[in-house]
Image: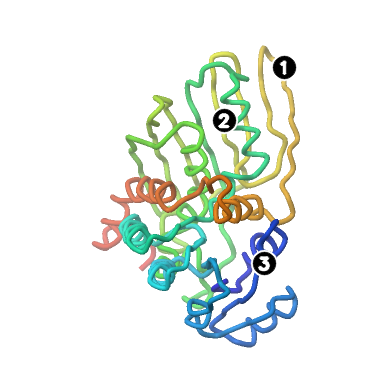
Amino acid sequence: MIGCGDVTEVKSGPGFYKADHSQLVAVMGRRGDLAADYARRHGVGRWHDDADAILAAPDVDAVYVATLPNSHRDYVIRCAAAGKPVYVEKPMAMNAAECAEMIEACRAAGVALWVGFYRRALPRFLKVTALVEGGAIGDVRLVVSRQFQRLPEIAPGRDGLPWRIDPALSGGGFFLDMASHTLDFLDVLFGPITDVHGFAANRAHAYRPEDVVAASYRFASGVIGSGTWCYCADHDHEMNEIVGSKGRLLFSTFQPLPIRIVRNGEVEEIPVGDPPHVHQPLIQTIVDEMNGRGRCPSTGVTAARTAQVIDDILRDFRISAAAGTHSGPA
């Protein structure tokens, strides 16, 4: 494992030593003291402060890259050069062009590339998929996504900026980090997005990246979708609604709320909780694939599709930001 940040403490790291037929044998962090502390607390045998030690280790069968997005491309290409299959955090990279480089490097090296869109394997989302595919709401007509969120408290100056809204580290703002989960799962339900139109702006002037986004899109299946995301709202709210010919299905991307089916004025709630380590079901599919049983559903190719959609939605905003003509802070 390269990187020992917050995401690895509960969401992902334990999944590697709790999945069947899997062991976390070494961790690396730029600060050796933090890597050593992580290894001690999680019972990992080795720690390093240099990624080359992991890439050269003969007992490492695959590498998990859990660093910030600005280093994903470099680490994945280094893993490929070392002949190591690689599982990289999402967002996969800073943009779709970097994703393409990563895919090509792994293809040329003959190693697998998986991406941490773990909702593709979570029980709650598998249930949503089964309900939609089983006709619980009839033929799907439309899907609508909404996410509203209060502004975070941000200390003055760059040092106080969370990495998710520092474009030099993340590639964008909260939209890139959070909406990618929703867009990736909609890709599972309805196929790749084939047409997309989007608008983005910086309305609160609290940080440089986009804080309001609206988009509409068409999926390969013919389903039409739209989404609105506001990260400078007066309240927190997030929900996806799928409209069918016989009812509606509502589910949250980020909260383990009951799935709701609305038919003929009646509401059915289906509770499906999330496991304690949300990456673990997807990690299990990776381990199984490496052992010749099945395939992991979240690959570099599928993740790159979501990266391209986000690039398309944010293109005009990024052009204006680069030219200094958008309304964000200096």
Q: Nearer the viewer, residue 230 or 279?
A: 279
Disc 2 residue type (three-letter): Glu
Disc 1 residue type (three-letter): Glu
Quarter placement of the N terminus:
bottom right
Q: Secondary structure at mark 1?
A: strand
Q: Is residue 249 above or below residue 24?
A: above
Label 3: few (<14), some (14–19) or many (≥20) C-alpha neighbours in 10 Å: some
- Residue 158, given in percent of the width and then of the height, sits at 47, 76
Is 173 displayed left or right of 308 in the figure?
Answer: right
Residue highlighted by disc 3: 23
Q: Nearer the viewer, residue 208 or 66?
A: 66
Q: Is residue 49 above or below residue 118?
A: below
Residue highlighted by disc 2: 241
State the separation of the CA atoms marked 2 and 3: 39 Å
- Residue 141, given in percent of the width and then of the height, sits at 48, 21
Q: Residue at x 48, y 63 (%)?
A: 85
